[in-house]
Image (spheres, rainbow, N blue to C red):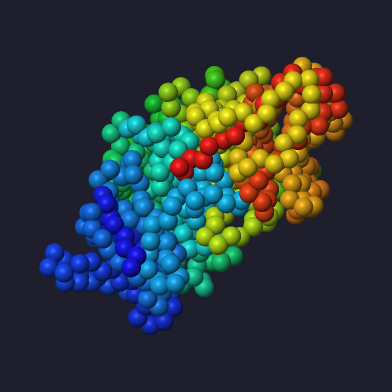
Amino acid sequence: MKKVNTKNHTCLEIFAKQTADGGKVRVLSRNADGSVQSVEKLAGRTYFAWLKIPLKQNTDYEIYSEECEVSLCYLSGSGDMLEEGVCYLEKNPADDRFYVPDQAAWYDRPSRESYHFSPWKNWMNDPNGLCWFQGYYHMFYQFNPHGQQWSNMYWGHAASRDLVHWVHFPVVLAPQEEILERPEEWKGGAFSGCAVASEEEVVFYLTRHKGPLQDGEDTVEQQWMMKSRDMIHFSEETCVIGQPPEGASFDFRDPKVLRANDRWYMALGSAIEGKGAILLYESRDGEQWEYVHPLLVEEREEVRCFECPDFMELDGKYVAIGAWMEHRDECGRYQMSRYYTGTWHNREFEIESDGWFDFGSNCYAMQSFAHQGRRISIGWISDFYEEHAADENGAYGSMTIPRELHVKNGKLYMTPVREMDLLKGEALAQGRGENLSLPKIEGNAYRAEIKFDKNTCFTILLGKDKERELSLVNDKDGLRLVTKGVKSEGIRFRADVEEVRTLEIYVDGRTAEVYVNEGEAAGTKVFYNSSADGCFALDAEAPEHVAWVEVAGMKSIWH
């Protein structure tokens, strides 16, 4: 018989929906006298009910689901939750009992990353509530625990001591009950938001969305607030902004809050008078908010709205960043994110320069936070080209490597945080003045570093699966990611750089991230490989200009 020992955990959290009347979850344990104690909970009739069943520590349990579907199941309530996190359970289809799978093996498959954060399974999108609090980095995220597609939004949660190794935490927020009860009429839930951390507590701001299945004037988006003193327990939510200002779109979401000049300011993604805009609000106490005016309006391009805006002070400048919804650029890239740098005086943002946040177009909804003098950002690795390869118990979506941001010469620079060095394994190959080819890299998780003493034409093969390929190309048409045999073939993923001096490339299962000229440009691209092995091949037109090249393995964050 398969039994689950709770160890330090005190609660079973399970999302279950009936497949027949009376479908339930049953938990069995034995008392000291040998008698069996049983606890039963009915699954939801029309939607996945979030069931929480108290358990005893260091006790063996048999857990069954009968005539119900379970989308996510884990043990929580540990006395050392910040270090241990939750313990995920999966059902054995042979006997309907739950067991504890091996976490490292669970992630070790071609369709998943090994050192980029992703959920245990199912859908994730935007990072939310990024912050550092009392010794830990925290990341919340948009989450559908029930499948590998977008649906009504929950908040997932993870924490880390070093920005690279993450521990999964319990789900934090769920969609509004009326949405869950009437999915044929309504959609929405807990949409994106941010965190403001002090020494004693963290204040969260987020959007609650409720609307018809097709977005329109009946869509309602409001800004809500909640608090936590331990990042395990959370206060009730309170509404702080009930409706958009006059002239603004029903797209009115994703608050980002910062402190400046003894005031709190909130940036919100929206559109005003039919043009994509980031709206600015002001508050003295962080609870009572007044609309000021648009922080910026995108006049040049047709953008439905801005999503997931960010606004920050960085290296003596102010930077605004936002994702362009339903926009396609001249290269064919869809829903890119744009940054703007400039000055901010008397609540007016004067733009001096702007550019694309990520030229690979698979990075969306970035969010940043400040800690110990660093501005760190994480973005959602999206898939607007519908290239996702569904896998049983797989995950749609993951997060980029954490990036450190800077402003240099009017450009936004970003580099992988130094903590990524913790994952570097042994060198697989090194060279200078020559090309380099590794046709088989076990595990397909590596970092390549290349330096050129002169700009030269090259092609670097980063992924190959039969006739499908992903390459990084530099020639007379500039530096760009090139795909072949996939849905994004023909789109120009072009970097805005005049020459290539250095490259730092991270390949991790289905994800490739490229950093150019020590952060002058960054590009993220999804590429699925059916094999567990990867490849790397540098083919430079003038290999004598390759000053240095090294390919090194990268360790999994889940061991």
Residue furthest out toward the left: 33
**Front one among 3 and 517:** 3
Q: Nearer the viewer, residue 477 or 536?
A: 536
Query: Could you say where residue 253 lies in the image, as x and y percent from the top left?
Result: 51, 49
Q: Assign the N terminus to one quadrant of the image.
A: bottom left
Furthest residue toward bottom: 21
Q: Position of residue 237 (x, y in %)?
A: 34, 51
Q: Quadrant of the C terminus?
A: top left
Residue 283 can be seen in this image? no
The outermost residue toward the top is 453
Quarter residue 461 falls in? top right
Q: Residue 302 location, x and y as percent?
A: 71, 47
Residue beneath the point at 57% across and 24% down: 406
Q: How many marks?
A: 0
Above-or-below relation of 192 to 209: above
Picture coordinates of residue 453, whole percent (x, y): 77, 16
Residue at 65% across, 23% down: 518
